[in-house]
Image (spheres, rainbow, N blue to C red):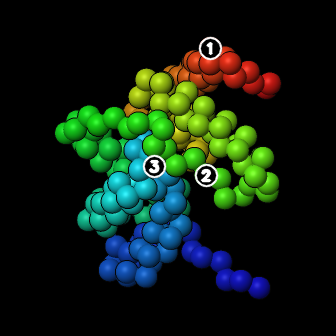
Amino acid sequence: MMAQTPPDHELLARAQRGDANAFGMLYDRYVDDVYRFFYYRTFNRQEAEDLTETTFLRTWERLGRLRAEPDLNFRAWLLRIARNLWIDRHRQSRETVALDALPLQDPRVPSPEQAAQQAEFREWLLQALAHLPERMRDVVVYRFFHGLKPAEIAALMGIEENHVRVLQHRALKRMRHWLEAHGIHLIL
């Protein structure tokens, strides 16, 4: 039987006392979430890795600002740091990404034909996502790539929970219309 890792608030308390191993456990628990946050904005692995590293460095520097309580949502706090870093970076330089440069591989594809179909569909979805206004794209990424609940997204973005639901609905509707305009019809 495997030992369970301590909850976030216990790891945070230990990390605040200088326990680098506890912070390492938090890092291991959330590094993929932070990486995905940046990857679906940059579509560049190296840049996403660099921004992820910077996020965890800022998190380490700011550990003392957070209270280690049982209802702690460390993941949301960490993603808020990532979001603020992204906003700062985005203000400094507004770069564009060529959609044909997007790596669209899915390592779980069982056959070459399915891989080609999935890669093509994924490319269409990423293009539809890229055409959304930033706030709508953020809601979709938080909701479907990070699995955050509307209340968590609301807290992260500083908006009302109902507004998150409206943005999600409008974003999905826009994505569907964009896909249909390009000959892709979804059955939902």
Q: Dot 2 corresponds to which residue?
A: 105
Tell me the kind of residue under disc 1. Ala
Front one among 162 and 32? 32
Residue ID for mark 1: 181
**Nearest to viewer (mark 1 / mark 3):** 1
Quadrant location, the N terminus: bottom right
94 lies left or right of 129: left
Q: Residue at x 32, y 44 (%)?
A: 86
Q: Nearer the viewer, residue 70 or 134?
A: 134
For residue 179, above or below residue 91: above
**Judging from the image, what secondary structure is the residue with disc 1 in?**
helix
Residue 39 — which label?
Answer: 3
* Residue lying farthest to the left in this orientation: 92
Q: Position of residue 3 (x, y in %)?
A: 67, 83
Marks 1 and 3, how far apart in space? 26 Å
Q: Considering only vertical position in the picture, is 159 above or below 67?
A: above
Q: Secondary structure at mark 3?
A: helix
